[in-house]
Amino acid sequence: KKTAFSAHDDVATRHVGSTLAAVRELQAAGVTVLAMETTSRSKSYASLSFPQEAGVALVLGNEVTGVDTLVMSACDDIIQIPTFGKKNSLNVAAACPVVVFEVLRQWGKLA
């Protein structure tokens, strides 16, 4: 186990055989699962209300190939961060904190 500042002591983790299996497990527990991907069906993350009751899981894909199409179709929705210019997306390291910040802001966890 290699994590920053021994995070594995404080953050519960578990292994699931595949991303698709993880999506289905989370949904069975009532968690809303959102894929972060740029597609013609994607909604702006800023237009969503993120449900707090059972939580939200974000699925982020490989920076070259993105989220697998089978995984995307299993997710509850697909969201994206609007961008301007020639590039149509941010890399994973930049995109994830943008959406996580919005989730926490909506849940009132930032004050």
Image (cartoon, rainbow, N blue to C red):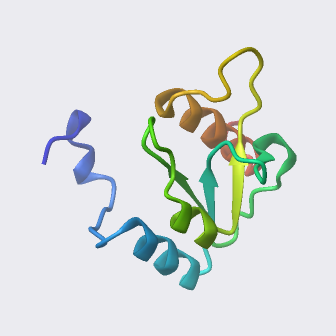
Q: Is residue 78 above or below residue 85?
A: below
Quadrant of the frame with the C terminus: top right
Find residue 46 and report its image quarter: top right
Q: Left or right: 64 with respect to 59?
A: left
Give the side of residue 15 with respect to residue 58, left or right.
left
Horizontal and vertical percent position of residue 107: 73, 51
Q: Residue furthest top?
A: 85
Q: Residue at x 49, y 34 (%)?
A: 92
* Residue 108: x %, y % from top left: 74, 46
In this rendered view, identify the residue nearer to me: 15 or 13.
15
Q: In the current view of this chain or complex, which residue is farthest to the left? A: 1
Q: Is residue 31 left or right of residue 3?
A: right
Question: Foreground residue, 67 or 13?
Answer: 67
**In the image, residue 76 lies at what x, y percent?**
68, 69
Which residue is outermost to the bottom?
28
| Res 30 seen here | yes
Residue drawn where x is 55% and y is 85% of the image: 28
Residue occupying image coordinates x 55% and y 61%: 69
User: In this orientation, which residue lies closer to the viewer: 34 or 85?
Assistant: 85
Q: So how many labels did they put on this image? A: 0
Can I make out residue 32 in this image?
no
What percent of the width, then of the height, locates residue 34? 64, 59
Residue at the (22%, 40%) spot, across then down: 3
From the viewer's perspective, is 58 left or right of 38? left
